[in-house]
Image (cartoon, coloured by chain):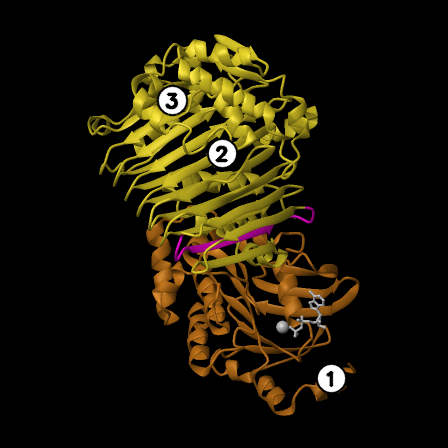
Chain colours: A orange, B yellow
Amino acid sequence: MANKLEIRDLWAEIDGSPILKGVDLVVPQGEVHALMGPNGAGKSTLGRVIAGDPSYQVTEGEVLLDGENILQLKPDERARKGLFLAFQYPLEVPGVTIANFLRLALQQRFGREVPLSEFYNKLQKAIEVLEWDESYVTRYLNEGFSGGEKKRNEVLQLMVLEPKYAILDETDSGLDIDALKVVSKGVNAMRGPEFAALVITHYQRLLNYIVPDVVHVMVDGRVVKTGGKDLALELEERGYDWLKAEVGA
Amino acid sequence: MSDAELKHISEDYRWGFADDVEPDVKLKGLNAEVVRAISRLKGEPQWLLDFRLKSLEIYFEKPWPTWGPDLSELRRQMDDFYYYVKPPTQQDARSWDDVPEEIRRTYEKLGIPEAEQKVLAGVGAQYDSEMVYHSIKEELGKQGVIFKSIEDGVKEHEELFRRYFSKVVPPTDNKFAALNSALFSGGSFVYVPPGVEVEVPLQAYFRVNTEGFGQFERTLIILDKGAKAHYIEGCTAPIYTSEALHTGVIEIIVMDGAESRYTTIQNWPVNMYNLVTQRALVHENAYHMWLDGNLGSKVTMKYPSSVLKGRGAKSEILSIAFAGDGQHLDTGGKLIFMNPDASGSIISKSISKGEGRSSYRGLVKVAPAAERAKVNVECDALLVNENSKTDTYPYMEIANETASVGHEATVSRLADDQIFYLTTRGIPEDEAAALIVRGFIEPVAKELPLEFAVELNRLIELEMEGSVG
Ligand SMILES: Nc1ncnc2c1ncn2[C@@H]1O[C@H](COP(=O)(O)OP(=O)(O)O)[C@@H](O)[C@H]1O
Ligand SMILES: [Mg+2]
């Protein structure tokens, strides 16, 4: 079986205007890839379309998870197959504690009743790695959280839900250097032969901590270049304009 | 209601079954003869019959409300209801074994005897017009706690009863309070002696079985000085094509330093007009909480009120309303400040789904003598679908300038983005919507005893099935 997340010629639009214009991308299990690109390139859209956001219409292409096209599946069904999206802008859900929500999500993720003790063990471990305060889990989901706390909370969810494929959308933005290190530690703790991640970022900075195996660059709705981690450094130095010129965007 | 609608509703409403129980007595029509017959059947003293007849006159004199939900359909049917239906039992039994089997099975289906064993201090069960069961834990009885049907209250404690009955909600209060005062039957009489604390809740369960019936229970609760109690009321009925009416009156006297709670989980089917008056008189340094959960009914008009009569009296009014298709729930609360240093709050959370409409209607009144009154009002509305409706009518009459008054109102929509966020964590869409709704009402729901909070969550999950997407 093909253990990878594969995007084939993916086209998606919103209200008739195309945003993704033929994305091709492969993230094999066990690897961490970075996805870079200028603002408005369609990186977040790609993440949301892979996760199943119903506000985008997919007009062409496939998203294959371990060989299975998941485009007809609902977001929750995709999650249960091991997909995870850390949001660029996580939403607030007042009145629902992180602990209650996460236990519910965990039971759905693995399709079984998860005993409280097992759940708390997992939660505890994740909190330790993330150097967070335990009292956060009794707070309402993202309500009144700072940008950085929201991002940390996304990684907490990632660690508890143990997806096979994670997409992290600008999890680094809005973090100071200490928070960045801690969040990276969380993601790195997940690395292993049965985990793959697509790390969306603007800045090479993050990639010092989460070192990618492969770097992709997205411009105007397509992946226009793929390379090693040096590509990130090159982008940092030269910006994106030369790439845009190269692909004629 | 069409048959198709009815079928749809009965699939969603688990409590819509009817029993094959032949009543002993059924009285139809709204007139003095029916009122006399009710009083005669109950063997009441003359003063109470006079009170009923006078109340009926007041009912006829008072105009129909010109505000709030549309009652025109109800008005046309007022002559057609059964106003008294006596189930085939002679007594307000003290043991479930003495309750007729068919009726007992209904309460078993509703989980009442089980809850009684586990989490309640006492249970009262009303079936159509009469209480068929009342019981409290023995040790409470020994401490002098009274928990009986309103009829036994009249019979066995006439003096106490008469001293307080209709003093908090007189028949002149409003048209439906007058109607209840004329026709009342069933409901509880509760007295807790000074200093006695009833730690676990007492529960009354109101069940309607007869089609085209009006239920008029009347509850009088007296907490003597420093006493403590929590009373919970639940209600359900079968689903019929014709409209039904439920018009209760609840009067609570909370004496100095006493602490009381009254919780309602109303889950009538959507053919019910639910028009209830409930008021507490809160004395010096006493506390009263209304926790009002309204899920069912076609129309609900209900504004639990607390009259803060004593210095330092406190009250909280917490309400949840969930209005689905074809429902208009007009709910809220009233706080009346009479004397210095009293404080109170109203927190109202309403959810409107489909074409449902929920309205918040509240009154805060501070009398000139009420120095340093502190009051906070918060009403939040959540709209689930495009056509869901909500409106607010907050009234304030502040006649003392030392009052500190806070008021906040919000309207939000169930956001697609929030649902998407939760579904990406593996939670199915319906459950995600239910989770958001549960979070929305959490500030109120967390005040419920655990079992009732669980029940409420389950009801909300049922309501939210298929509501989005
Ligand atoms: N929900 C949406 N509605 C309208 N336009 C959108 C929406 N989502 C994305 N877009 C547009 O698509 C383009 C790509 O956006 P996005 O995927 O957020 O880019 P990136 O994450 O790479 O900065 C932008 O021009 C953006 O305005
Ligand atoms: Mg983005």
Q: Quadrant of the N terminus of chain B?
A: top right
Element on which disc 2 rests: strand
> Is residue B372 located in the magenta-colored stretch of the structure?
yes
Type of amino acid at the residue the image marks with label 2: Thr
Chain for mark 2? B
Q: Provide residue B142's location: percent of width, then percent of height.
A: 20, 26
Q: Are marks 2 and 3 in contact (CB under 8 Å)?
A: no
Nearest the camera: B287 or B231? Answer: B287
Write down the quadrant of residue B111 in the picture: top left
In the image, the segment drawn in magenta is B370-387
Nearest the camera: A112 or B434? Answer: B434
Return the mark for residue B150: 3
Q: Are marks 1 and 2 on the same chain?
A: no
**Mark nearer the N terminus (2 vs 3):** 3
Looking at the picture, does residue B374 appear above or below residue B465? below
Distance from Cα at disc 3 to Cα at disc 1? 83 Å
Element on which disc 1 rests: helix
Q: Are marks 2 and 3 on the same chain?
A: yes
Label 3: few (<14), some (14–19) or many (≥20) C-alpha neighbours in 10 Å:
many
Label 1: few (<14), some (14–19) or many (≥20) C-alpha neighbours in 10 Å:
some
Type of amino acid at the residue the image marks with label 1: Lys
Residue named by callout 2: B277
Distance from Cα at disc 2 to Cα at disc 3? 16 Å
The image quadrant where one finds ligand 2 is bottom right
**Is residue A92 visible from the viewing direction of this image?**
yes
Chain for mark 1? A
Residue named by callout 1: A244
Label 2: few (<14), some (14–19) or many (≥20) C-alpha neighbours in 10 Å:
many
**Is residue A192 visible from the viewing direction of this image?**
no
Q: Provide residue A199's location: percent of width, then percent of height.
A: 56, 73
Return the mark for residue B268: none
